[in-house]
Image (spheres, coloured by chain):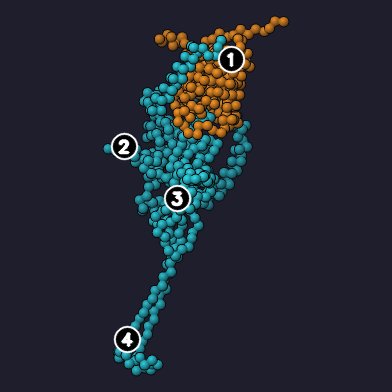
Chain colours: A cyan, B orange
Amino acid sequence: MAIYSAGRRRTMIILLLSSILLITLDLRGNAVFNAARSGFGYALRPFEIAGDVITRPAERAWRGMTEYDDLLAKNEQLQRQVDAQRSAEIAAENALAENRDLRAQLNLESLADYDKVTASIIGLSPSNFDQQVEIDSGSLAGIRVGMPVVNDAGLVGKITRVAPQTSIVMLVTHPSYHVPVKVVAEVLPTPSTTVPASVPSGLAVEDVTTTSSTSSTTSSTTSTTVPGSGSASGSAANTPSNTTSTTSSSTSTTTTTVVIEVTRETGALNGFGAERLPRVRFIADSPLFGVVVEGDAVLTAGGSESLAPPNIPIGRVANVMRRLGIEGLELEVELSADLDHLAFLTVILYQPSTELVTG
Amino acid sequence: MIGGILNSSLTRIVPIAMILLALQKTLLEEMRPFGVIVQIVLAFAASAGAAGGPERGALTGFTVGLMYDLAVGTPLGSSGITMGLAGYVAGWVDLVRIETTWWMAAAFVALGAAVGEAGVPVVRRFIGEEDAFVPEMAKIVPVVAVSAAIASIALVPIGRWSLKLARPEWKMPND
């Protein structure tokens, strides 16, 4: 029997063409396929529940064998973190309240402005090449494709598929994940006597936190000339006969301005798979725009076309890689959210203004 | 037509694939030897190939691949290609040997699963996914292949039953 025969080749060509046709139709968006996917999900659900119940003992035994030491270490580490965070919590609550008040006064966009849906994870990706999870809320809860997904630590991913009661979340580490971000760094306070028209990062002065202290010194000198009194210069002849009181006042003002410089660079965050850190590209490597260093915070940039609202924490810069020519910097980002231990997720019901249906 | 479908092997392949998909989405997501997810559905596609030859393997792989895409949310047809390829390659065992031994079948199932898993990033790249090739490929493909070979001991008979094939007559050589 030959490996390649006419009939076999024909079968393979038909299967290949069918696959290509299906992929093309699916990628262009097809209501029939979406309905089929949703229906198949319903049909598979009883099998999954049964499989989950039956295999749970084996699953627990496996996890007990492989994760016990990790669990102990993690427990110790978490206990230390809890102790450290207890004291920070009070200060943070105060700062949050202040932040809320200030944002409300300035009419600034805030995450609190958006409705949210909390969902639990009902499935992980069964593939070695996808970084995605399945959650137990869908279009019936108002979830739409593209909406950002977060947990308490920060950005987790975005919605890529929605069924009535379930949704698929593409994680930040997925190679197809992209989101506009900004890099924010606070530099130690620098004393100066004048307020610059703009800061090196290109921000307007209004965006810069300025602390100003003014001290005033007033000195008054009063001289009184009495007619007929002896004067070495004899200038008294020119002095009016009446008594004149002259008061000169000089005021010297010393201003000490403390500027907290904020470097705010924008770029695009891309996922690089589960084993590698996501990277931010398109960062200008120019001193004019400030210097990005390890430890700087990375947040979503927002914007009219971004699928995520501004100021969702993503993580911190772990590595700064300088590239040749005009390619600029590339930053590796240590995510705030621990994607290996997700339990509950929050979908922010946000759609960019360019996608909102008006009327 | 309905009679034709009922008489075809689909009536067996579909329920078996549903059970394996449920296993894939529950137990095997958690049990990750060396951090790699064992691909039981892919192993079944390859085992069907080892049991029934390249054409049947490709058709079975295509069918279960479509079911996988529907269940997981990957572009419909992308796993159809890779699992069809796995079934086709594993089916070569029929062409190199008249009577297949269990270890030969296991070896070809491993080969088919390796080709199928290695084909995933290739297909992803063709459909426009950037950075589809991950550096862990060197670890993923061997683990998936070895696990498929081990699973083939159970999956090849199941594949043979699914395809309604007669059990081969195993004969001990007479001295």
Q: What subunit carries mark 1?
A: B
Residue drawn at (46%, 61%), measured in percent from left and top? Answer: A258
Tell me which amino acid carries mark 1: Val
Q: Residue type at mark 2?
A: Val
Tag 3: residue type?
Arg
Mark in the foreground, 1 or 2: 1
Query: Residue at left 40%, top 9%?
Result: B1
Mark 4 secondary-structure assignment = strand
Res A309 label: none
Which one is earlier in the sequence, the residue at label 3 or at label 2?
3
Which of these two is toward me, A308 or A120?
A: A308
Q: Which mark is residue A244?
A: 4
- The answer to whether residue A306 is above or below residue B155 is below
Marked residue chain, label 4 = A
Asked if marks 4 and 1 touch (Cβ < 8 Å), the reply is no
Q: Which residue is mark 2?
A: A357
Question: Are labels 3 and 2 assigned to the same chain?
Answer: yes
- A4 lies left or right of A353: right
Name the residue carrying label 1: B93
To which quarter of the image does residue A232 belong? Answer: bottom left
Is the residue at mark 4 from the same chain as the one at mark 3?
yes
Q: In this orientation, does residue A273 appear?
A: yes
